[in-house]
Amino acid sequence: MNALRDPEVSMVGVYGLGGVDKTTLVEQVAQIAKKEKTFDTVVMATISKTPDIKTIQEEIADKLGLHHFEEVTVAGRAPRLCQRIKMEKTILLVLDDIWEALDLKKVGIPSEGEHSGCKILMTSRNLDLLRSMRVTKHFWLKVLNDEESLSLFKSMAGNLDKEPDKHQIALQLAKKCAGLPILIVTTARSLIDQDIHAWKDALSQLVKIDNEAFEEITYSALELSYKRLKGNEIKAFFLLCATIGKNPSVNDLFKYGMGLGIFNSTNTMEGARNRLHNMISALKASCLLEDDTSTTRVKMHDVVREVAISIAYRDYHILVIDRDDAKEFPPTDILSKCSQIIMCHCHIPPAS
């Protein structure tokens, strides 16, 4: 907050490992900025691994009340968006989850010289990337230490004071989660109301990857939470939430879920919708979906989504192509094994 108040600082960056909760931090900063009226306007947009400039433009514009673009192209929309941003005397733009250098001018975000009242707060996994975008003040969001990890684990798993055996296992589990809040929370939530044998089993599964790469620790902890979901129906729904795109709509989940037979346990449309909302609540309770205020979309942490997509491909041969401007299909030997092919934001031109 001090950096954002500093008139000499125009761009602030937060960086750290995936799963360390950079998004949560900047969301809190945005809320504080709104509450304290540090800026006239605060706008947050998600960039993601495969950024779509038009979508970013529309997300920023919509939050500024600019609901319709007369221009069709990215280049045509940029000046209109820039003009709208300049109308705000002071504005904070929060650009979350940047994976590669983003051309702010191409989006329509004014430079410091064009609008001194516009400040930008960005998150990324890579400090060098933030530096390449001329971030002048950056903060490293570190993983939790052992004491913080245990405190978070206990708060999520329930009261362990009267269960010393579980307390000792909780200490070891928290350490195995490598200080990442997303892993600690999902692991702890999956063990609520489980007996001591389930706790020991969880620990043994995490211990097995003690000397493996960090990515495998992340994968193992999240896969454990997935495995502890009760029933194949909710497991299939969880994978659907991950594979049909980032922050999918509830209506799309309903349509695809019906088509894939995920809601076959009920015989009516109303029953299927109730089942869908019940599963969304269950996944939020397990922290495999984020507890978002939106009633029309679901939100999943990017690290959780990466693991879910990997599980979907490995166990069910579901191929997710999640990139812009894909030029060609994957090789035939890969496609021939797939039970589903899901193409998110892909624009493959027809064969000439």
Image: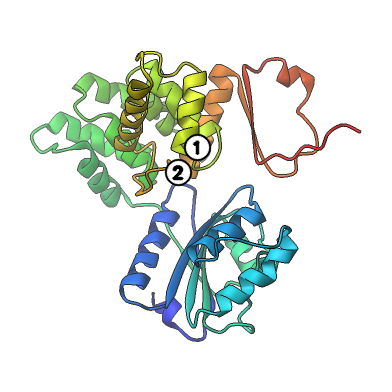
**Image position of 345 (left or right of 24):** right
The crowding category of the residue bearing disc 2, from other C-alpha atoms within 10 Å (few below 14, some 14 to 19, many at least 20), is some
Q: Which residue is mark 2?
A: 301
Q: Which residue is mark 1?
A: 305
Report x, y in % for residue 218: 46, 37
Contact (Cβ within 8 Å) of mark 2 with mark 1: yes
Indicate which disc residue 261 carries.
Answer: none
Image location of residue 135, percent across then percent down: 58, 72
66 to the left or right of 33: right
Name the residue at 45% across, 28% down.
Answer: 254
Q: Amino acid at mark 1?
A: Arg
Q: Nearer the viewer, residue 344 or 67?
A: 67
Which residue does the image show at 55% across and 65% down from the upper left?
Answer: 66
Q: Nearer the viewer, residue 90 or 157?
A: 90
Q: Measuring from the top left, give residue 17's x and y in whole percent.
A: 49, 51
In which quadrant of the rendered image does the C terminus lie? top right
